[in-house]
Image (cartoon, rainbow, N blue to C red):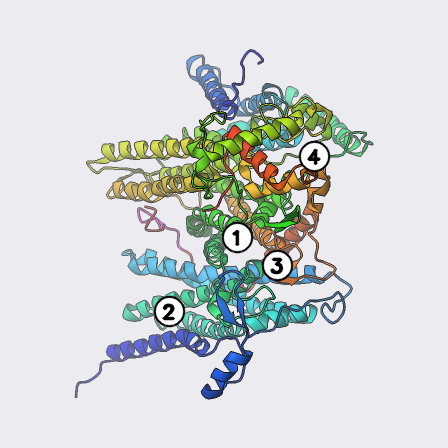
Amino acid sequence: MAIITKQARKKIWAFLALGMFSGLLLLPLFLSLPTGASGADPVPAASAKAADAKSVEKSRDVWYKTEGPVVGAPAPKTTDGPKDYPRYNFESRVLLWVGLQQHLYYGSFVLAVPIFCMVVEYLGIISKDKALSRKYDQLAYDFVKISLTAYSLTALLGGIVIFTFLTLYPTFFTYLSGIFRPVMATYALLFIAESGTLYIYYYGWDKMREGFLKWVHVSMSVMLNVIGTVLMMLANSWIAFMQSPAGVDADGRYLGNIWHVIHTTLWNPINVHRLLGNMAFGGGVVAAYAAYRFLTSKTDEERAHYDWMGYVAMFIGVCFLIPLPFAGYWLMREVYAYRQQMGITLMGGLLAWLFIIQAVMIGALFLTTNYYLWQGMERMRGAERYQKYIKYMVFVLIACFIVWLTPHTIVMTPAELKAMGGQQHPVLGNYGVMSAKNGAINTIITTTVLSFIMYQRGNKIPTVKWAPLGNSFLFGFFTMAYINIIWLAIYGYYIPANVRVGLSVPQVASTLSCLFIGVTLNALMLKGAKDTGPIAWGQISVRSQYALIMLATSFTWMMGLMGYIRSSVRLFWHVNEIMRDNSPWAFTHTIGFGANMISFNVLFFWMTILFVFWLGSLGAKKAPVTAPSGQKVPIPASSH
Amino acid sequence: MTGLKLVEGYMPIQMLGEMGLQALLFIFIFYLLDKKMGIKVNKLLQATLLFVYSILYFRYRIYPPIPFSVRAIYATMTLIGIFMWVSSTEEAWQDFRRPIIAVADATTGAAKMIRTVVIILLPFLVGFMGYNSMKPNVDEPIELRTVHPAPPASTKVHGKTFVLQTAQSPFRVDNDGKYSDKVQNTYIDGNPWDEKAPPYLQYVREGGQIFFQNCHWCHGDNLNGRGMFAFAFNPIPANFTDPGTIAQLQETFVFWRVAKGGLNLPREGFPWASVMPPWEQHLTTDEIWKVILFEYWHTGYYPRTWD
């Protein structure tokens, strides 16, 4: 009999553990398969046929237009009173708003951070430099340690939200949970799977530090993220249903097809948008944490470490920020396609001013990112040669930002209106529409990519033979991209709206090509490049760290804002066109009130997350942090 | 600045082009002063000059005048851009800070004098701003007018219900009488007065007749919102040639607005600053569809569609 070595035993256990996790992951899906959400008792086959003919009423799906058996009760018609809307002496909606927003902030954070951990841990594994590898590993461990406390808070806030919902909106909650019963059960089971995986992932870190077990460990992070993403998608199905219901008839009666209820028209756009948003947000929060630690650092070593950490977090966050506007564009396009009035309420009507604020925030994010990269070039010897281009890039960014921010509906006094001779300004009116905005944002993003490429090669001089050719290609490629983006923005005024919407595809393609081809080509050119000096980590201006904090605050504020907009657009509906909101709060708040609420939520989140960080630092060992030295600068593999 | 004309149709690009040229000129001048003439102008002075110049440009160059709210946005953006530029490198940032620090430290007699003046003037400035914001204002208040209020899901005109998401113009049809969103493009240069004109162009002609009998008084011969009665109203009627009006809307939205007029704007349309009559009281349903058909054909814009 062959002797099983200790190593092999470990492998077997590892496979078993992985198999169990996979099973755990799939279990809820199996559980939800046999029945729909009917809740009806099983009917014997013989009598079922007879009953079918007599009693099974069929109805039409409001979205899919398919016929289905009515298996749910109609949406309740609520009345303003203690039965449907029990309340404290306070606006119930605002209470729920705060609870949900905090839950979302933490939920996003704990979904994003494991993705970071996964990436950073993987970078550590593949890194050939031992010291750098350990550094990455420690960083990933620090991340997950922070997220562990945040995870408990997320669950706690989730409980608070459920109780608030149950006690303040019982009728609505009963209706919603009646339809989503299997989804909610799956959600709860997945939550258990997520918790188990997370705890083993965290507490097993030291045990699975070396060799094959390390790969098992990083595979667990993949599984953790798969579960997390499915959890998020399930939760998204509830809000997507409220906004664009499907799987029910016009009276709100469930028609037995749970997939229709989940897979509403806005579900996938929301999924994509939220996933990217979470990542960008998570990056922002970690970067802000690093910036805070940088600013309070007492030694050069600490400054170097937190400078590096801030950079890595910012880098990952921005990678997801870049495709975010495109995902947002897709979501809005689907909203318009679903209901014209919803689209107009959002972007041209009642909520249009909030979109202007959103535009400000998006612009601020990209400006801040560029600014941070330019500041980062200060700590590289040799990057001076690119600094002379900054002023031109500032101009391009600001000119685009001006176009991006020009409102379609201008605020003006009646006297100004008269002087202007009409509601539309003949010059600025053209900046107020989508064609111009698309051109502007794509140019801003392409310029951000250009800044990054400059940063990439800050302290390097390409030595590959084809460098001149590569440089010419990059120059030509970016020039063509700018021309394409701007030309299509102008051309968009001369064609039908549906074709114009399609123009965004080549524009986005130009931007993304610059991102992927430009960055990849640049990285290839920098292989074996001549170093003009190491990156002097820690020797970055304090302004850059304030920029990181601003980046994070902008993310948080924008998340609050966009969530509010998305939710408000239902106006006086709990479930759009299905279940009416008859509480006294079925009105849209003023812009000022909304903005104050968002600010309150942002402030509250940052206060509590600081507490979480503090908790995390309590358990931290006073491990000496070594400054990165020499040529081996600890930066993501993809960036240098 | 009045010597240079803004060319109609190219104004938005012209404005951006002018901004770019001015920025280049600005860079060039200070490059010449520094490198060729040896006069190094401090970054704070450069920044101040650039900011003041941009304020003047947006205030006086663009006509019609830009409302203050937009100029405030532009000025803020310019200021942010200037800050990014002067603080992009440590050297530039130190150069920018130097005069400010010098005044704050007051190491020289002149600096001391400036600091004294600033310290004396600052409270007055704050006081003046406080006075300005507190003093009673007799101007009409700013109204956040919603130009395109969200339409209802459906509207009833002459007893028939139209679902705005799905309804189609019965006259936007090809030669076989089938609805076509391509037909306008096909006949965009066609002649509606041609006796052999296809049905679509004939409907356009009929729509034009209705327009010139009923609408052009306010919306103007060129559909640009400058009809003979236009300036009796504030705001003046909608300018269909602007890319922000009918070009942004589904045909059914326009149908709803024309049929119901200003009187029946929804609550969201506050302050209901529209005196357009509810045209359903004067025109038939077909006439309303035809006049809309004409408006799109004449301006060359296409109604918004989603597939």
Q: Is residue B88 visible?
A: no
| Magenta range | A626-635
Q: Is residue B182 left or right of residue A578?
A: left
Q: Is residue A53 visible?
A: yes
Task: Answer whether labels 2 and 1 touch (C-beta < 8 Å).
Answer: no
Find disc 1 in the rendering and name its residue.
Answer: A338
Q: Which residue lies at the image location 48% right of the left edge and 41% below the top edge?
A: A366
Q: Quick one: A415 or A469, which is closer to the camera?
A: A415
Q: Amino acid at mark 1?
A: Tyr
Q: Earlier in the sequence, mark 3 or mark 1?
A: 1
Task: Answer whether labels 1 and 4 touch (C-beta < 8 Å).
Answer: no
Disc 1 and disc 4 on one polypeptide chain:
no
- Magenta portion: prevailing SS class: loop
Q: Is residue B115 left or right of residue A254?
A: right
Q: Amino acid at mark 3?
A: Glu
Find disc 4 in the rendering and name its residue.
Answer: B276
